[in-house]
Amino acid sequence: MTTPSTDGTRAYPFLEACERIGIGEVKAYEAINRGQLETFKIGRRRYCTEESLQRFIRERIAESSAETAQDRAATAAPAVAGRARERAKKAAEKA
């Protein structure tokens, strides 16, 4: 059940919030402990705002993009070095 507030912000019960972003309860608590996901409590129930979920997703996308770029660079470097060695070897053979 979504809980709308007076300023238009939506809050989701914790387990529903986990389902919305596709992570399990354990991973969500890990994200909370690392400060990556903000929640609040009303009584004993924990909630998460739509804004917090959106921020969490944006940050994960940015991290993933950075990791992918690093992986591409690490993979490309040996290939470029290998081609340079091959060119140098061919040039030496011609000389």
Image (cartoon, helix red, strand yellow):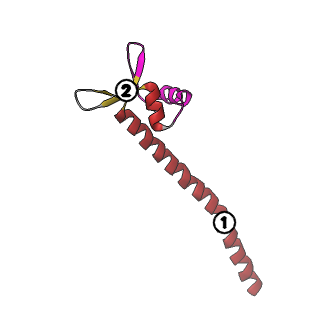
Q: Residues within 10 Å of mark 2 (few under 14, many from 20)?
A: few
Residue under label 2: 1
Pick out the residue farthest to the right: 93
Question: Residue at (51%, 50%) from the top-left corner?
Answer: 66
**Res 95 seen here:** no
Question: Residue at (48%, 42%) from the top-left corner?
Answer: 60
Pick out the residue farthest to the top: 43
Residue under label 1: 79
Drawn side of residue 6 relative to residue 93, left or right: left
Of circles 1 and 2, which is in front?
2
Residue 37 placement (x, y as % from top left) = 44, 31
* Element type at mark 2: loop
Which quadrant would residue 90 be assigned to in this image?
bottom right
Residue 54 placement (x, y as % from top left) = 39, 39
Q: Which mark is residue 67?
A: none
Question: Residue at (43%, 31%) from the top-left corner?
Answer: 17
Residue type at mark 1? Ala
